[in-house]
Image (cartoon, rainbow, N blue to C red):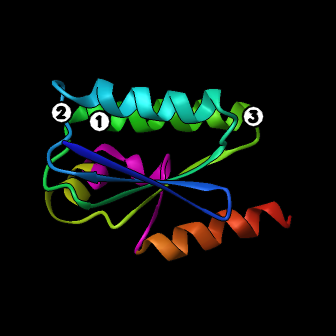
Amino acid sequence: MLIHEKTVDTIAIISLEGEVDLYNAKELKDVLDKKIRNQQYEIVVNLEKVPFMDSSGIGTLVTAMYKLKKYHGNLKVCSVHGSVAKVFKLTGMESHLEVYQSEQTAVDSLIAERET
């Protein structure tokens, strides 16, 4: 798994490439935890280039989202497709994680939340 990071309007964008599973979910957890330690409480995780994610990856995302909410932040997921979308749907993750069609709509959602 490759992890690409950038910032847009103080929002951390984490783009993943490759499978996210038990063997590498800790790498993602470490990146998310570092963002939280650095007080970057708005995060978008882009899954456009992720063909497979197991429960370890999903658990990592949900845990990070709940940590962020403690600081009035949030985590959004975007560009979910294929088998990852099926896993999200079957596990009911769509009711826990906010999933957006594109990175831009996820970013716009976080910006809109600031204004409320």
Is residue 112 inside the magenta stretch? no
Q: Residue at x 20, y 55 (%)?
A: 50
Query: Which numbered disc flags the more N-terminal residue, 2 or 3?
Result: 2
Q: Quadrant of the C terminus?
A: bottom right
Q: Position of residue 96 (x, y in %)?
A: 50, 46
Q: Position of residue 7 (x, y in %)?
A: 56, 58
**What residue appears at the point 43 percent right and 33 percent down from the top-left corner?**
31
Confirm or deny contact between disc 2 and disc 3 (CB under 8 A). Answer: no
Q: Is residue 8 left or right of residue 24?
A: right
Q: Which residue is mark 1?
A: 57
Q: Which region of the structure is painted magenta? A: 88-101
Residue drawn at (30%, 43%), measured in percent from left and top? 91
Q: Secondary structure at mark 1?
A: helix
Q: Earlier in the sequence, mark 1 or mark 3?
A: 1
Q: Residues within 10 Å of mark 3 (few under 14, many from 20)?
A: few
Reading the image, the residue beneath label 2 is 21
Q: At 30% from the left edge and 51% from the top edge, which residue is drawn?
A: 88
Label pair 1/2, CB-CB below 8 angstroms:
yes
| For residue 71, side relative to residue 100 (left or right) | right
Which quadrant of the structure image shows residue 78?
Answer: bottom left
Give the residue number, with chain letter if any, for mark 3: 71
Work out which quarter of the rendered image holds the N terminus and state it: top left
Label 2, secondary structure: give it.
loop
Give how far across and how far down residue 48 sits, in percent: 27, 64
Spatial separation of the CA atoms under disc 2 and disc 3: 27 Å
Which disc number belongs to residue 72?
none
Give the spatial CA distance, label 1 vs label 3. 22 Å
Instruction: Give the vertical position of 41 relative to 26 (above or below).
Output: below
Q: CA distance from mark 1 to mark 2?
A: 6 Å
